[in-house]
Image: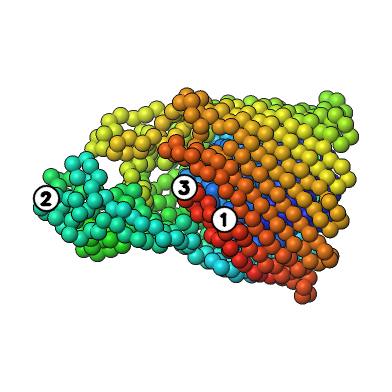
């Protein structure tokens, strides 16, 4: 029973920590919803430790995850992929509770500050048995910092750099049976920009024309005289971003067997970015129809808030029984607007009049979940649970009644033989849109040798269509009409509803884990089959959502960690995966075929550490079938621990060799330096 706590992960990689590179038990709950060590999990589980996060220089979850050898985070920082599955198939949890917000999940990675995170557990592969919908690709559970046993303790971390500044504060304490915690974070990040030319076009008689080539009077003449054929802008490849987060918790131990808690958090986020829109409406008409322009500079502004509050209890009437209940409420408010700096040229009286892609939404979630763990004996444990979620939306983007989700599961863990451990279970889910799914899972580990553990598993997963995929009716920031599967809009040619089904998956995994006194080697082979894949489908005048394909993703991933010397440690990671659309006989888009990483840590003296991580992302296929080239990025960092009393000082440079990523993926800043300190009390 082992786990890895390794020295020197740069930017929160799961690499090594010099003082405690050792084979230990790391207890997690993500894999079975019961306390088990990482090595006892029948599916692959990774852990990013608190020390790696605190010393990483990362400002948010995106930067923490980006350095890991087994996850792909796009250079834009907005999307993530586990074993080739998209971010829509990855379930994000905070302390076991769903993160509620954007359906696309594109913003979530950037709005969770690293300062509130104690550690991160990542479960790979289909996990719907325990978590229901949305866990087809895997689960990321963010464990927030908890009160310590001391009267008062905490830390303050301040960081500044080339394009960002952040401050993190955490305080916790205990007074008799009452414990408390408080955290606050502020992040301000400037956009990363590069010069880009917008070659403007205007649609005339179904043909894209340069403004100078337009013919006719009226609006055509105005556009011909006012619009240039091209404009050069400072295109934002990452947004200007400002986030403010506060949160806290109270817990009271009424007795040795009953504990209750309440916690709350608030997020305020402002972001904006200048880009080139695919399509933008002018203020001119021809024959009653709006004249459309293409490749127009546009500026998007988002103002978002989220409030969470939760309460619950833990009840342990005996050593054999443990009952948990949680009640959580989340309210997310979104305000998005897009304007064009060419408002006058497009015929608008003011910049405010050029507003488009308006999205003013309030999303509310109420979740009840309960779990019972019954330990029959040291070789048998039953875990059962139920969940009920209510989702209410008020939005300019779509109109829909409340949706409900209900699910229940039962799981049996057993050790029939001394070296053999089995886990199996079943789950049933139903929704108010008449979707019903049954999910099965079975897995095993076997201790072939004292230091060699085998594992194998089979798991089913599913993802129900979300409100956006079913009901959305709006123009997106790129000027494209987006219609949900159930929406009819004959003005753009959508004359019928589409019966959108849940997408389902089956994941098979085999692997082994072996180790020595100062090394560890972990290998896994996996295969995921996906049926009724939900995809965006583009038609002439709109984009909608349909079940269009069956897919298969298979691959091998391996990590090797070794202490080369008492002061030098190394981690190697390699992933290869093949992702196929079995219906169209094409490659799946946005799935790197290979990933590799090398992490080094050198500690010449006990309180000084140098870190380096190089990560390679291989070729992938773009949305239009184009080949997108690979790239590599190297980050370096130095940490001086206890340079001053209770204070660590650090400095680093991301993308030190100024490598350029393919523009399709979003560009990375070159030589992004930062310095900071972490004061603990």
Specify the label residue 533 is tagged with.
none
Foreground disc of the pair 2, 1? 1
Which sits in the foreground, 320 or 81? 81
Upstream in the sequence, badge 3 or badge 1? 1
**Residue 153, percent from left and from top:** 74, 67
Residue 184 horizontal side relative to residue 35, left or right: left
Asked if the residue at tag 1 contacts the one at tag 2, i.e. Cβ–Cβ closer than 8 Å, the answer is no
Specify the label residue 216 is tagged with.
2
Mark 1 lies on residue: 659
Vertical comparison of 458 with 125: above or below: above
Mark 3 lies on residue: 664
Residue at horizontal 61 percent and vertical 30 percent from the top:
554
**Residue 339, percent from left and from top:** 32, 59
Q: How far apart, in angstroms, are the residues tagged by discs 3 and 1?
A: 15 Å
Which sits in the foreground, 566 or 54? 566
Upstream in the sequence, badge 2 or badge 3? 2
**Residue 661, percent from left and from top:** 53, 51
Vertical comparison of 149 with 459: above or below: below
Vertical comparison of 506 with 358: above or below: above
């Amino acid at each position: 029973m082992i786990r890895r706590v390794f020295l020197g992960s740069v930017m929160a990689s799961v690499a090594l920590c010099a003082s405690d590179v050792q084979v230990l038990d790391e207890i997690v709950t993500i894999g079975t919803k019961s306390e088990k060590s990482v090595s006892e999990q029948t599916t692959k589980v990774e852990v990013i430790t608190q020390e790696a996060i605190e010393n990483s220089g990362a400002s948010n979850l995106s930067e923490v995850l980006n350095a890991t050898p087994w996850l792909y985070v796009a250079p834009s920082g907005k999307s993530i992929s586990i074993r080739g599955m998209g971010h829509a198939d990855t379930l994000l949890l905070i302390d076991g509770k769903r993160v509620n917000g954007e359906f696309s999940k594109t913003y979530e990675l950037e709005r969770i500050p690293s300062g509130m995170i104690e550690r991160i557990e990542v479960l790979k592969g289909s996990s719907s048995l325990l978590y229901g919908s949305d866990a087809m690709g895997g689960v990321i559970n963010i464990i927030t910092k908890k009160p310590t046993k001391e009267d008062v303790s905490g830390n303050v971390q301040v960081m500044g750099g080339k394009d960002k500044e952040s401050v993190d504060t955490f305080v916790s304490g205990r007074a008799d049976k009452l414990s408390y915690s408080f955290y606050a974070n502020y992040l301000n990040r400037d956009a990363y920009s590069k010069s880009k030319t917008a070659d403007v076009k205007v649609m005339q008689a179904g043909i894209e024309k340069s403004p100078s080539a337009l013919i006719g009077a009226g609006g055509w003449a105005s556009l011909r005289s006012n619009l240039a054929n091209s404009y050069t802008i400072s295109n934002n490849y990452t947004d200007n971003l400002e986030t403010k987060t506060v949160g806290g918790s109270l817990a009271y131990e009424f007795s040795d067997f009953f504990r209750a808690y309440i916690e709350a958090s608030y997020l305020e986020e402002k972001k904006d970015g200048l880009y080139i829109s695919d399509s933008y409406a002018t203020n001119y008409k021809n024959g009653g129809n709006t004249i459309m322009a293409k490749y127009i500079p546009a500026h998007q502004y988002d103002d978002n808030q989220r409030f969470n509050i939760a309460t619950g209890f833990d009840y342990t009437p005996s050593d054999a029984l443990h009952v948990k209940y949680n009640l959580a409420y989340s309210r997310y408010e979104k305000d998005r607007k897009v304007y064009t700096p060419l408002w006058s040229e497009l015929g608008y009286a003011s910049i405010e009049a050029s507003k488009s892609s308006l999205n003013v939404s309030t999303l509310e979630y109420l979740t009840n979940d309960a779990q019972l763990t019954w330990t029959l004996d040291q070789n048998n444990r039953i875990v059962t649970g139920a969940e009920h979620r209510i989702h209410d939306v008020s939005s300019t983007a779509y109109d829909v009644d409340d949706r409900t989700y209900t699910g229940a599961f039962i799981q049996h863990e057993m050790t029939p033989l001394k070296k053999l451990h089995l886990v199996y279970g079943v789950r049933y889910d139903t929704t108010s849109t008449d979707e019903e799914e049954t999910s099965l899972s079975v897995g095993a580990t076997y201790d072939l040798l004292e230091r060699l553990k085998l594992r194998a598993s089979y798991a089913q997963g599913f993802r129900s269509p979300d409100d956006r995929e079913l009901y959305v009716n709006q123009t997106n920031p790129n000027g494209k009409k987006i219609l949900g599967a159930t929406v009819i809009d004959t003005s753009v040619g959508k004359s019928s509803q589409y019966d959108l089904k849940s997408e389902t998956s089956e994941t098979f995994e085999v692997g082994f884990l072996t180790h020595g006194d100062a090394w560890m080697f972990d290998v896994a082979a996996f295969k995921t089959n996906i049926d009724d894949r939900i995809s965006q489908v583009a038609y002439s005048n709109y984009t909608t959502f349909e079940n269009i394909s069956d897919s298969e993703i298979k691959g091998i991933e391996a990590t090797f960690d070794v202490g080369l010397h008492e002061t030098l440690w190394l981690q190697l990671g390699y992933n290869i995966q093949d992702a196929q659309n079995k219906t169209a006989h094409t490659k799946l888009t946005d799935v790197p075929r290979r990933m590799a990483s090398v992490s080094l840590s050198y500690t010449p003296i006990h309180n000084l550490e140098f870190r380096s991580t190089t990560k390679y992302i291989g070729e992938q296929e773009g949305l239009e079938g184009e080949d997108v080239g690979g790239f590599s990025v190297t980050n370096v960092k130095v940490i001086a621990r206890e340079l001053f009393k209770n204070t660590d000082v650090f400095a680093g440079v991301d993308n030190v060799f100024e490598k350029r990523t393919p523009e399709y993926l979003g560009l990375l800043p070159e030589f992004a330096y930062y310095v900071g300190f972490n004061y603990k009390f």
